[in-house]
Image (tube, helix red, strand yellow):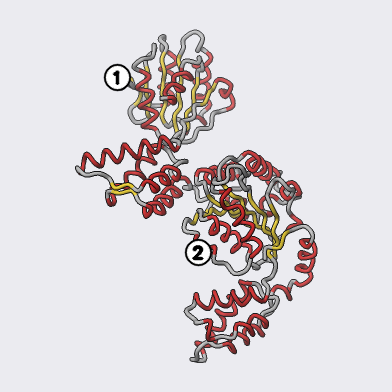
Amino acid sequence: MKELHDLELILTSHTPVIVIESLEEVRVTQMLAQLGLRMDHPMYQWTVTEGLRRLEADFGAQKFTAEPREVLKHIKALSQPGYFLLLDFHPFLDDPIHVRLIKEIAQEYEQIGKTLIFLSHDISIPPEIRHLTARFNLRLPDRATIKRLIKEEARRWQSQNRRKVQADQLAVDRLASNLTGVTATDARRLIRSAIENDGAISQEDLPGLMKSKYELINQDGVIAFEYDTASFAEVAGLANLKEWLSHRHRAFAGKASSLDQPRGIMLLGVQGGGKSLAAKAVAGTFGVPLLRIDFGALYNKYIGETEKNLRNALEIAESMAPCVLWMDEIEKGVSAGQSDDGVSLRILGTLLTWMAEKRQSVFLVATANDVQRLPPELLRKGRLDEIFFVDLPSETTRRKIFDIHLRRRNQAPSGFDLTLLGSASEGFTGAEIEQVIVSALYAAQAQESKLDTEHLLEEIERTRPLSVVMGEKIAQLREWAANRTVAAD
């Protein structure tokens, strides 16, 4: 196994401190125990609950070594070389005495080769000993490894239940692809749950498994996830955007190897004009999960460590590929001139680097309300494939919006004069048309009457749309977009 070989190489590289960040403690411990049986020096394991003991052979715990300071003193005093696996030591690395003891053990490595191995889910090594440290990264299983795990779990279930697992080959292939990005332990558990349910692996298992995978890798809640996106394709208008996406669907799905894979798009437009629906329509057209990062929430929630959490969010998106990553109100995170001690510039740098280097099938959709706040580096060709302008809906689109929202509220569109409504609602956004219907329903209920065209026309007359309230600003935005963007509709 390549990982075992790589771990052995780093153990024999004469590095005094090795750091392993992983949630798979049992798996790493088993690998080290296996290596301990063939290494020249003994392998020890320490926990705060049991103290120090041999890892590859149980000779009992050493007395008086449960306390962090005592175990480090004990290791320092030993006159024989060895490997010392310290589990969950990260809370104790803030103590200057512990740091000093670790440094002294490491500096004596040439005299007595004692290697300290720190294993935890998250470890921040003090700067004093970083130059004495190497990191080992446990690889996440690839598609071939996950297929092997599926076969192993199918054989296990078969031996227990004395019948074969019913497997849809297409579902198995999709399951192997969809479970990349999680640990081998978690992948095995998710596979097992799919089989245990009904003794089969089918297409019906996939949505639940994707949701479970998302919950595993997004425990910090930095992005929102929606798997079932088919209905998003049913959006009124946006004819040019839909046609553009249809031309790139095969390339995004990896079925047109001679073409560059599409990178993403920017959606600019009037607030409430349908940018959010357009972003969702991309996921619906491609038929993949939708992940959403709200830059405003990310920036406010994680001030001080925003860049790190953005990197985590981007890693999650890559592990969920193929998917659409929607960055909502992106100007809130990367605006030039913000007095934020340079955080927005670092966010922009992180994002641009990822956009240039990403290899996974993650299609980026960035939406913005205020184009003047966007840095030119983000808008130039090559970063994204195209910039679309989502304008106020046309009369034809407004009629469709009335149709959609009436149906959603169990109202038959045939009972309304959609032509008249479409004409009367000039300048209204989709959100404003929806609110007209909601308000008219309340009015009809108060009058104890059935909703009709007149109720809707009265609400239209009472409403002052954003195109009137913010007319000058919208006119400026339209003028700016006229020769710089492609009309979405």
Q: Which residue is mark 1?
A: 57
Residue at disc 1, secondary structure: loop
Q: Residue 140: image x %, image y %?
A: 46, 35
Q: Residue at x 60, y 40 (%)?
A: 358
Q: Is residue 70 visible to us here?
A: no
Q: Residue 371: image x %, image y %?
A: 74, 57
Q: Amino acid at mark 1?
A: Ala
Q: Observer-nearest residue: 214 or 58?
A: 214
Q: Residue at x 57, y 24 (%)?
A: 130
Residue 434 in which image quadrant = bottom right
Res 231 label: 2
Res 82 label: none
Is residue 265 found left or right of 228 in the rendered image?
A: right
Q: Residue at x 35, y 48 (%)?
A: 168
Q: Residue 192: image x %, image y %?
A: 32, 44
Q: Amino acid at mark 2?
A: Ser
| Above or below: residue 162 compared with residue 477 | above
Q: Residue 178: image x %, image y %?
A: 45, 45
The disc, 1 or 2, on the residue closer to the chain's N-terminal end is 1
| Above or below: residue 169 compared with residue 95 | below
Q: Observer-nearest residue: 132 or 404?
A: 404
Task: Rate crowding at label 1 as few (under 14), some (14 to 19) or many (20 or more) other CA atoms within 10 Å.
Answer: few
